[in-house]
Amino acid sequence: MSEQQIDFSSYDFIQRDRINEYLKKMIAFGGSDLHVKAKAVIRARKDGKIHQFSGGIISAEDSRTLAKEILKSDYVKFTQEKEYDTVHKFNEKYSFRVNFFFQKDGVSAVFRIIPTEIPSLKALGMPDIVQSFTQKERGLVLVTGITGSGKSTTLASMIDEINRTKYKHIITIEEPIEFTHKDRKCIINQRSVGKDTLSFKAALKASLREDPDIILVGEMRDRETVELALHAADTGHLVFSTLHTMDAKETINRIVSYFPVDEQHRIRLSLANVIEGVVSQRLIPTEDETGKITGRRAAMEVLVKTPTIEKLILENRDIEIPDVLEAGRDHYHSQTFDQSILDLYNEGVISKQRAKDYASSASDLELKMGGLSSTSDRKNTENTGESETIQIEEEEDLFDLK
């Protein structure tokens, strides 16, 4: 029987149930991503590090069967496109964003955890200024960072805040839908690219005829989507979106670089007019007194629209943005990554070395620290080798699947 004619009624879903057991174990010990690779043991990411489950390898045949059991009728499309995003509902509390893809040994998949309950902005440790972005009536708000930095969670929390406090019509365009929003005070229409609409561009263009107040675009990944998002913000809508950029300065530059040189001044003019805020995130491992990793906290750079920021964007002076963010902290509540990281260090949740590793400028940050080391830093320095070994052994024990 060809892959176009799969009879799923004959499947016993043993591989899906097997993976569910791994997902259950990973949830219990605070993991974030499960990695399934044909002809390899199953691994999981916890606190930023990859750890190996005990147990045998998953065969190429079993990995392909797993894809069929989870994707079902979408499996045919997966074989055609060679990669596929979907959501796997585990139970009432957790779902997983899943990406299946082919590699040289067969099929691989990565399952990323999505809590069903959306955390509040306060629970995420967001500065109060981030909450203020949800009160805007129009403009563009961007959440940026590398993959796995928590962008989707932050956006979901912002939409949830609006849903609980304002009477609006919200349209989300996502690939795939991760967090599910229930109508509270708002009407929320969630559209999945590939299922409910053909593309971000098509859905965004159509949304302007659907009486929205707020539009969430899962990712601004091409020139057409960026232009439509800017147009939506310019015509009186509040638009939220994400980019895979490291900080506010790079975010502005990335948006402009989507366009040819002769159009970039026009885009800078539009962007300077509509931008309301940029929240850039980095997740930093936290440690106890022995140097053992205990979790992760988000360091955040926050750009807030000011006349000076508008001028810098318009005049192609993006390189000056970090200095303006730093200087505007007291008055505008903007902040740089290094200011946020210094706060975490002063709280005692990250070590001096960890702070320097994640800083935009390690030398500048060290100067701001005043060259002082806390007691926990000295303990971390003294016990680095021993504690790292203990940490790996203990965490690998946690991932044993009996």
Image: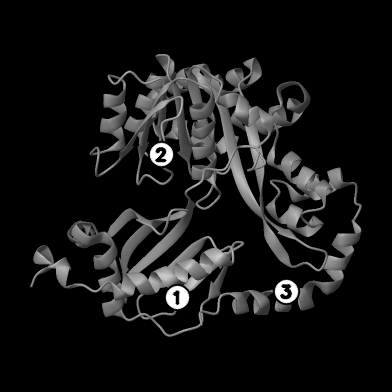
Identify the image quadrant of the N terminus.
bottom left
Which x, y percent locates residue 172? 38, 33
Q: Are marks 1 and 2 in contact (CB under 8 Å)?
A: no
Which x, y percent locates residue 170? 40, 27
Location of mark 2 (residue): 218
Q: Compared to 213, does 69 lie above or below? A: below
Tell me the element at label 2. loop
Tell me the element at label 3. helix
Amino acid found under the numbered disc labelled 3: Glu
State the residue lying farthest toward the bottom: 56
Amino acid found under the numbered disc labelled 2: Gly
Quadrant position of residue 277: top right
Location of mark 3 (residue): 388
Amino acid found under the numbered disc labelled 1: Ile
Tell me the element at label 1. loop
Asked if residue 28 shows in the view, the reply is yes
Location of mark 1 (residue): 42
Which x, y percent locates residue 203? 28, 31
Q: Earlier in the sequence, mark 3 or mark 2?
A: 2
Q: Residue at x 41, y 80 (%)?
A: 40
Q: How many marks?
A: 3
Label 2 crowding class (10 Å Cα cut-off): few <14, some 14-19, many 20+?
many
Q: Residue at x 78, y 43 (%)?
A: 343
